[in-house]
Amino acid sequence: MARKILILTEGLTSPHSAKTACSVIRYRRDEVVGVLDTTVPPQPCQALLEVGGDLPVVNSLDALPGANVLLIGIAPTGGTLPAPMRALVLGAIERGLDVESGLHEFLNDDAEFAAAARATGSTLRDLRRNNERDVAKRQNISADCLRIHTVGHDCSVGKMVVSIEVARGLARRGADAKFIATGQTGMLVEGDGCPVDAVVADFISGAVEKLILEHQHHEVLVIEGQGSLTHPCYSAVTLGLLHGCLPDGLIYCYEMGRNMAKGANHIELPTMESQRELYLAMANTAHPCRFIGVAINSRCAEEAAYRAERDRIESEWNLPACDVFRENPEPLVDAVLEMLKD
Amino acid sequence: MARKILILTEGLTSPHSAKTACSVIRYRRDEVVGVLDTTVPPQPCQALLEVGGDLPVVNSLDALPGANVLLIGIAPTGGTLPAPMRALVLGAIERGLDVESGLHEFLNDDAEFAAAARATGSTLRDLRRNNERDVAKRQNISADCLRIHTVGHDCSVGKMVVSIEVARGLARRGADAKFIATGQTGMLVEGDGCPVDAVVADFISGAVEKLILEHQHHEVLVIEGQGSLTHPCYSAVTLGLLHGCLPDGLIYCYEMGRNMAKGANHIELPTMESQRELYLAMANTAHPCRFIGVAINSRCAEEAAYRAERDRIESEWNLPACDVFRENPEPLVDAVLEMLKD
């Protein structure tokens, strides 16, 4: 049966707080029938999420009876279900909808949800549930597959989007490229991948290495980055991923105007230049690696400020730079194609 | 009831493969009644483990009927139970012994073990089981508590032992020092701590931070390191721990003669000097930090070679250096006491 997804963003229907919803609408638009938020009047999605056009935001589970999947459209720090969503999830299960969640707190471990699902035959899918138990071996890595990895100044700067756009741009130019999803939203977009931040710490590099080995028959892999090497919460995930995927090329991603760490507003971000050196040092202990481009997230900037920033970065870093949405990913795609020629 | 521990090392009764056994015998000797290995003749423990004196190695569960706990005395890569141990664990449960395990594979998740334990009333304790779900906040960290952290060239170089010896040395000199255990063996020795390599990756720094907040009423915390920043399998654990405990001072630990990564014998270890710079760079993004000493593991070296190495390191690193067993931890203890004065 075709998936008809209703995305739950209760009380959090904004581009920053409903990242998962925005990306699924952007990249899986044909499967989405609407967005559920009982705290706002029914309206087109575009006004609230800056994506989705006239896709309806509805305020009742009964407004879109054709939906067969309720997707929890947020990914909060800590990964627990916000209390106001609980009754709506239960209501969806009682109506027989499947429920999909990328939270750290698993739907299947909730006795009330599990009992309701047994009663109605609903399936509860926990995207972050995994049983990864392999350490990295760093063997049998193909030299014929180019590995590109997005890393960032902070979390939530657009590493997933840049990875998808570069992989799709490469495909448009005839390269055999695959996006490697490493988080729940990327997995929803791509249909495969691994929720690396939910893997037991000893096995994170091993889980990433398995993804690489599985897909290295492709010409290029574009591997989604997570967090940052200096984020107070998530640096372990970032390094486990970096050392698990052994990139040949890195794309540095940042948001213009971001000065403080997301989720830790008292922590100043390091300079981009110092961070670039940390990434290079840590990556090169495992595999020869260099930066090949910079992805600028300019969502809060005026056009002129963006253009000045792009020119400055291109000149100071001596690398192509662009906002993949405001312009297009071609400068980064070109940089990858250049590496393929080497 | 007093714990009378029988340590299971079946077929692996050597200092390298039975690390957990050796440390529990070294630091909890009064609770241990023997070592179980059915593959070797009964003999004193010292001959096989280089520790324990005349503590008996026995070849049957029935040899020491007073034992009330079977402890799995190994910590293999991947953390699964070796097949030859299975029947002995089951036999122990059937005899009513409690079983303690630091493996990643949990005894309580094994249907056969769980059923047997229900039948006899045995308790199965999985030391690595945890439900850590807090991200790091990097707030309310006391400036009055000095944090010392052991880091290393590789895994299994003696970071736990150095941490314990320095903490005990500080206590002997009148400082209020506590050893912070971050692995299952350290937890067995200290009676508290957190198995950080078994925490879900997103929460490793948060779990470590909780340990710090809980114990920062002490004057000094000596926090056990794990893995290394360049180990192919475990670098994520190392960085999550480093960024979670925010050390003021680092002790660099290495084994003389070790050139290849443990568990990944095809991977060359980086130079100690390059690794020192990586540790400093990564630690200082989070909190001002410097090296205060070097711990040399010289177990495979002759005395003259050790002395030459110690003198070379002290001169080249301009730091006190010692093997805490071959000599004593006093040079490192002195370095911590110096920091306390500052």
Image (cartoon, coloured by chain):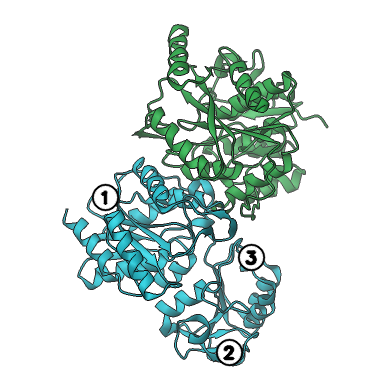
Chain colours: A cyan, B green
**Secondary structure beneath label 1:** loop
Identify the residue position indicated by label 3 in the image: A80
- For label 2, the residue is A58
Q: Is residue B147 above or below residue B173?
A: below
**Circle nearer the N terminus (2, 1):** 2
Q: Residue furthest right?
A: B1
Tag 3: amino acid: Thr
| Image spot of residue B120 (x, y percent) | 76, 43
Please determine whether, in this image, residue B85 is positioned above or below residue A63.
Answer: above
Circle 1 is placed at which residue position?
Answer: A142
- Residue B30 position, x and y percent, is 74, 21
Q: Is residue A57 above or below residue A251?
A: below
- Of all residues, the one furthest to the left in this rendering is A341
Q: Residue at x 44, y 88 (%)?
A: A53
Q: Give the distance between the C-alpha atoms of the residues marked 3 and 1, in whole angstroms.
A: 38 Å
At mark 3, the secondary structure is: loop
Position in image of residue A142 (x %, y %): 26, 50
Structural crowding at the residue carrying mark 1, measured as other residues with C-alpha within 10 Å and reported as few (<14), some (14–19) or many (≥20): few
